[in-house]
Amino acid sequence: WESSFQSSSPLVPKFLKILELYRAGDKKTFEENVTTWNSQVQAIAPEVHPWRVRLEVAYLDFKPFECAALFYFLAFGFLLFRETSSLLKQLGKLGFFLAFLFHTLGLVCRVLILARPPVSNMYESLIFLGWSLMVFTLIFSGIFRHRLFITIGSFLGFLTLLISDLLPIDSNVSALVP
């Protein structure tokens, strides 16, 4: 593995110059150099589509798995006390479906960014396992018409996302290493 700052690429000195321009506050020259540098990078690596880069930035800013974990947790809490209020039952279901939506959105983003299934490392496998459990939760809940499946499923969804976030495993969006 070679550090990008010690690389023999001709783009490294240009990138270091961009950093200096940013620190100096020279906005006009900075933007011109960034535009030039981006076109040079695009020429070297044409397989990296700009929409993938924008999607990855949005994915990293939005953090869909953190949103999903929060909604799974809220759904579990509401569904635990569903007998006391019809509103809690509806909020629990809504929370579960929102969590599943964010969970699915996160997986779809990873697939589109990496152009491969999200099961190549431990983090991705845990995320995919949690999503698979939620699919089975929806199937069993639909077949048996019992809210216990969604209650337990929301807890398991929260737990798998929590474990994947807390374990010291790499959650970066990165290409497979041959």
Image: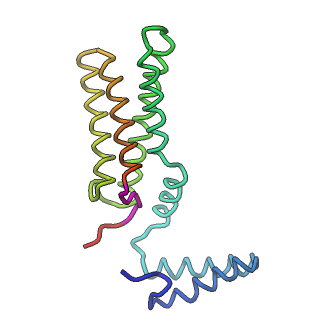
Question: Taking 144 as reference, is 50 left or right?
Answer: right
Which colour assignment does the render follow? rainbow
* Relative image position of residue 85 (x, y in whole percent): 49, 9
In the rendered image, the quadrant that contains the C terminus is bottom left
| In the image, residue 38 above or below residue 54 | below
In percent of width and height, residue 16 lies at 59, 84
Q: Is residue 169 magenta?
A: yes
Q: Nearer the viewer, residue 150 or 142?
A: 150
Left or right placement of residue 162 versus residue 25 in this view: left
Q: Is residue 108 above or below residue 141?
A: below
Vertical position of residue 170 compared to residue 21: above or below: above
Residue at x 43% of width, y 13% of height? 82
* Residue at screen point 50% across, 55% down: 60
Residue at image location 42% in from the left, 29% down from the top: 97
Question: Looking at this view, is 50 or 114 the one in front?
Answer: 114
Q: Quadrant of residue 146?
A: top left
Q: How many marks?
A: 0
Judge whether residue 172 is colored magenta: yes
Q: From this view, report whether residue 163 is shown above or below residue 98.
A: below
Residue 40 is situated, as x and y percent measured from the top left of the image, at 52, 82
Position of the N terminus by quadrant: bottom left
Q: Which residues are magenta?
A: 168-174
**Would residue 59 be found to the left or right of residue 125 on screen?**
right
Residue drawn at (51%, 13%) of the image: 87
Q: Position of residue 140 (x, y in %)?
A: 24, 23
Q: Magenta region, mostly helix, strand or loop?
A: loop
